[in-house]
Image: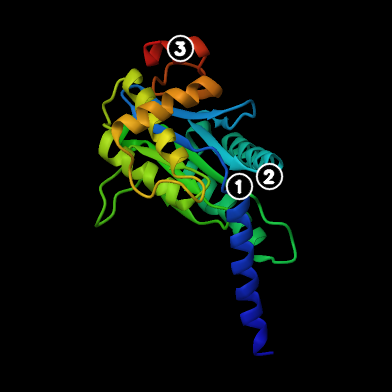
Amino acid sequence: MIEEPYRWVEAIANRAEYIETQLAAGSPIAAVGYRDGILFVTLGRGRQKVFEIYDRIAMGAIGHPGDIERLRMAAIELASAEGFTRSAADVSLRRLAHYSLSPVLKTAFEQVYGAPYLARILFAEIGAKQESDLFLRLEYDGAIATNSANFEQTRQDFGAISGTRQSTELMEKFLQAEHSAGATFERAMKIALDAWTVGHLALGDGGVKELPARDKILSERKDRLRTAGVEAAVLERDDKIALRYRGLSATEIRSALGD
């Protein structure tokens, strides 16, 4: 009897290690606030990783495609039900994450005889003003991190996820130093791609442990853009338009980069 709790703890530790291994190669995703909205950016070779959820809410995810799709559909259904029974204005990312998605992920993670979700998710909800924008990271075990201010940290106008925690932390460190809330769309695009590059350089056993030099980031970014496609989307702040979420075309991306 005494050994049972210890076996459970050991099983949970092994489970976390397994999931982290499965996620380790995931291509980073950066979301940054700019003057007129929120921009999501990632690089890849075909599989979609950025999605609209509901009106003012979007998400990016890394992990197993099947698990991502299950969580995406759950988020859409929950938001739609909330919007139908109340109103679209009542749909809240905080409620969606804290009271619905997080408990589901936590339960799946802790039931050691069932399959966990192999996914790490980045949500963003656009507000009427930039200071109301919410960025929220949801982990496979149900843990939540947001851009809200606390005693030691000022509020952040960005979010990031990657295959490893070290990679995510370096992306956040880069964005903390380089990103400004009032950035233009063009500036936001370049900063988001540079943040992706920092995250990519930090992946793997031989990944960087500190922020790379500026020339290293630019060189790596150019190399990656030659071999991988950019997936980007925006949540627009203008509440007069019918659809806030919009995927960006290759022409818009090249124009923002000055190509």
Q: From mark 3 to mark 1, how far is it between C-alphas?
A: 29 Å
- SS type, badge 3: helix
| 98 sits left or right of 6 in the view | left
Amino acid type at circle 2 is: Asp
Q: Nearer the viewer, residue 144 or 171?
A: 171
Percent across and percent down for residue 106 are: 60, 59
- SS type, badge 2: helix
Density class for disc 3 (Cα within 10 Å; few <14, some 14-19, many ≥20) is: few
- SS type, badge 1: strand
| 152 sits left or right of 7 in the view | left
Percent across and percent down for residue 9 are: 60, 75
Q: Which residue is mark 3?
A: 252
Q: Are marks 2 and 1 in contact (CB under 8 Å)?
A: yes
Percent across and percent down for residue 65 are: 68, 39
How many numbered marks appear? 3
Nearer the N terminus, badge 2 or badge 1? 2
Taking the spot 62% from the left edge, 36% from the top edge, the residue there is 76
Q: Nearer the viewer, residue 25 or 12?
A: 25
Amino acid type at circle 3 is: Glu
Q: Which residue is mark 2?
A: 67
Amino acid type at circle 1 is: Ala
Percent across and percent down for residue 81 are: 63, 38
Q: Which residue is mark 1?
A: 119
Can see residue 129? no
Residue 14 numbered mark, or none: none
